[in-house]
Amino acid sequence: MPDISDLIDFDSLLTADERALRDTVRAFVDSEIKPNIADWYERAVFPLEIVPELAKLGVLGMHLKGYGCAGRSAVDYGLAGAELEAGDSGLRTFVSVQGSLAMSAIYKHGSEEQKQEWLPAMAKGEAIGCFGLTEPTAGSDPGSMTTFARRQGNDWVLNGAKRWIGLASVAKIAVIWAQTEEGVRGFVVPTSAPGFTATPIEQKLSMRASIQCDIDLTNVRLPESAVLPNVKGLKGPFSCLNEARYGIIWGAMGAARDAFEAALDYSKERMQFDKPLAGYQLTQQKLVDMALEINKGFLLALHLGRKKDAGTLQPDQISVGKLNNCREAINIAREARTILGGNGITLDYSPLRHANNLESVRTYEGTDEVHTLILGNKLTGVPAFR
């Protein structure tokens, strides 16, 4: 059955296999996530017990081929991401950190030994990974990172700090990016290594059912085999960030759709002045405007997904999707809350939770401002980052 927000027969653009995958992930979210997410969000916990279930769904590193990964298409990955984020942004973020960041870094840039050691276990959910790029004073400008790795004999010694690192306190391995005398390099760091400390960031107003951490690296000694051998420079982490940004294009629209559906259902049931809210012109305008942007957002996501599968997707096109769909999704979630009135500030309803989460989603993997400048550079040929 098509989504109530689907005004254009979007399903006709998908294959039977794509619809089946989406429906499988949606059923999991409906049965296992939505009944519990308010409690998890209020208590600020990420339910690690669902990790094996996510592995059984095949969504951990699902776009990677071999090593126990599902080898699904970019469109499949996007559809799954939309359904996961309809449950909660923290759920899709887990899949993104695990698959698009940590696993992709090893898959794209690691040695065969690193791939064999980590990717099968990560695909099964037996090992959780994290991706350490952002620092306390180096977010949008990762080139200014101060974490440094120096050679000492045959070893490397890492010192520095990372911030807002998803899953770090529950991870077995961390992909850490550091400056070296030969440029930025990536390191596969066991979190049990002496000198590695991950501390969850608490008292968050957003992404509460998710884990973000500070990482401290104090004389973390690593062998040469810890280096990701096949990349030097920021193109390494950026190639992984583009995978995560692509997933956000779909995920944000999943959150928007869920917020819209909550508002639509409420508007049909809530009586004011002797008729349902849905019977008022202002309410219908809000609902129509939200539905139009959801339809456009999913069309954009699908177009970019088809290009990604064809190997023709460009980084600036990912910025189009990330900027537009995050911006529209947060507007939709906020507008949906207005239909719910005062009840909308409770966790009985999803829109404000989605809006709070989307404040993080629009910030990580490139802020609105950064993606605007990427596209401004594309249009004008004049970089305006500094």
Image: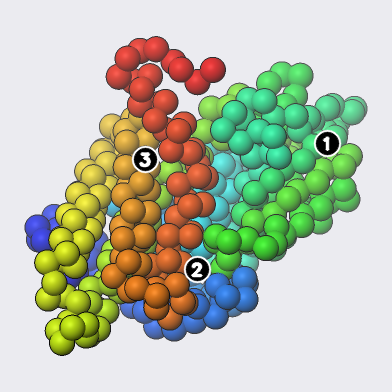
Q: Residues within 10 Å of mark 1 (few under 14, many from 20)?
A: some
Please indicate whether residue 68 sits to the left or right of residue 311 in the image: right
Which residue shows up at 32% across the image and 42% down it? 324
Question: Residue at label 3?
Answer: 323
Q: Nearer the viewer, residue 377 or 233?
A: 377
Question: Residue at label 2?
Answer: 55
Q: Above or below — where is 61 with respect to 244? A: below
Name the residue type under label 1. Asn
Residue 144's x, y, as percent?
67, 25
Please indicate whether residue 102 sits to the left or right of residue 290 in the image: right
Please indicate whether residue 104 sits to the left or right of residue 218 in the image: left
Q: Which mark is residue 159?
A: 1
Please indicate whether residue 6 sits to the left or right of residue 317 in the image: left
Kindly state the secondary structure of the residue where label 1 is placed. Answer: strand
The answer to whether one can see residue 58 in this image is: no
Could you tell me if the residues under marks 2 and 3 are in contact, i.e. CB atoms within 8 Å?
no
Quadrant for the N terminus, please. Answer: bottom left
Disc 1 to disc 3, how far (Cα)?
34 Å
Residue 137's x, y, as percent?
69, 34
Q: How many marks?
A: 3
Disc 2 to disc 3, how far (Cα)?
29 Å
Name the residue type under label 3. Leu
Which corner quadrant of the image does residue 80 belong to? Answer: bottom left
Which corner quadrant of the image does residue 29 belong to? Answer: bottom left
Quadrant for the C terminus, please. Answer: top right
Q: Residues within 10 Å of mark 3 (few under 14, many from 20)?
A: many
Q: Nearer the viewer, residue 313 or 363?
A: 363
| Residue farthest along the front direction in this orientation | 273
Q: Nearer the viewer, residue 255 or 133?
A: 255
